[in-house]
Amino acid sequence: MATHRLYYEDSYLQNFEARVLSCSPAEPVQGASGMQPAWEVLLDQTAFYPTSGGQPNDLGLLGDAAVLDVRDEEDGIVHIVDREVEPGGVKGCVNWPRRFDHMQQHTGQHLLSAMFQERFGLPTVSFHLGAEICTIDLKGGEPSRDQLIGAQRAANKVIFEDRPVTVRYGTREQLARLGVRKEVEREGLLRAIEIESADLQPCGGTHVKSTGQIGMILVRGCSKVRQDWRVEFVCGRRAEQFATEDFARQRALAGSLSCAVQELPEAVAKFAAEREANFKSLRAALRQLATVWGSQLALNAPVGANGVRVVPMLLQGAHPELLLPLATEIAKNERTVALLILEESGQFVFAQHPGAGKDLGAVLKSVLAAHAGKGGGSKDFVRAKLADAVNSAAAMELAKNLVEA
């Protein structure tokens, strides 16, 4: 028996009565404190929306049972609940804040997709309504900044005009004649959502009654996903929340940079330029230090029985950028090997003069076999990082023994 879908008739229906057709144990589901028992409930009718078409399922209550999931299956709409529901009549209550949020996002998506297609020839190929961010994937060229803002502005104009959002029914051919945005292959009577003078699209989801209830659409970004372009957006309460949080972050940044919010772009650009200049100066200073210090270290290192000088250094408090130039300078000296490890982070660089005749790649392999980490290199030069910096001293001791053997 097919479940009568009350949400098709009234997306605003929060409370309803139904008859329990069956209730049987289901596979355990993930709860807040781990896996928990669950039951599958079939009703003769329901206001709970099942996950479908990019829109997540509703939550709420069936009697005293919490609705954990809602699925659209062949036998009807299955409600996954946290306890057994007795046969007979039952009252259902839909979690309204969640439902209305989904209605805002879904109707907003229809409108935004319509604007991208109508104004810029960018059709929507998929939609996802996430817990925080919603996305649509657009087919075609990369949307420019002006196109992203243009679609957002056009959609919000329709929202501010508070146009009616209505449900239409018709066959695929009938809807095609009415100018449906995206034709579907399904046959029979189809349900479509119409935004007055803006969009007509087959859809089984829940929607608001007028565009004004979407509140506002805020486009958040755009990125390449395979062959398409993924646009992130939020609507309604989410848009308000994101805008409020954005402004709070901007105020905090402006405070830390001692500027007004409207001066942030220039202040950040100046800060980034100064930071890059400071890094260049630091790197230059570290190279100069490495040149002087490296020569001294190589000169003072004792010559081993095999005629090789080994410079093992477990550095403390040194800048990570010093490792590479210092090891390189040490290895410029005839038959000299540099073994440098930064104790605090477990980063290391091993380098040698080719005349030293060692295989640092093999040394690295042995060190990482004894102490987990990641890295690579060649016979004369390797760099890596230990998974746990506490092993820095032991790794140094092992590397030193292997080189001096």
Image (tube, rainbow, N blue to C red):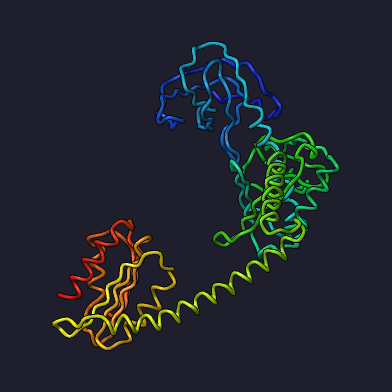
- At a point 52% along the width and 30% down the height, the residue shown is 69
Residue 85 at what x, y percent from top left? 49, 15
- At a point 54% along the width and 28% down the height, the residue shown is 77
Residue 337: name its quadrant. Answer: bottom left
- Left or right: 269 in relation to 26: right
- Left or right: 279 in relation to 118: left
- Left or right: 102 in relation to 294: right
Q: Which residue is more in the foreground, 106 or 398? A: 398
Q: Which residue is more in the foreground, 144 or 172? A: 144
Taking the image as drawn, is residue 173 in sight?
Answer: no
Taking the image as drawn, is residue 52 in sight?
Answer: yes
Q: Which residue is more in the foreground, 262 or 36? A: 262
Q: Which residue is more in the foreground, 135 or 97? A: 97
- At a point 55% along the width and 20% down the height, the residue shown is 43
Residue 190 at what x, y percent from top left? 67, 38
Q: Is residue 307 above or below residue 46?
A: below
- Left or right: 375 in relation to 133: left
**Tag count:** 0
Residue 233 at what x, y percent from top left? 67, 49
Q: Quadrant of the C terminus?
A: bottom left
Q: Quadrant of the N terminus?
A: top right
- At a point 71% along the width and 51% down the height, the residue shown is 251
Residue 320: name its quadrant. Answer: bottom left
Residue 240: name its quadrant. Answer: top right
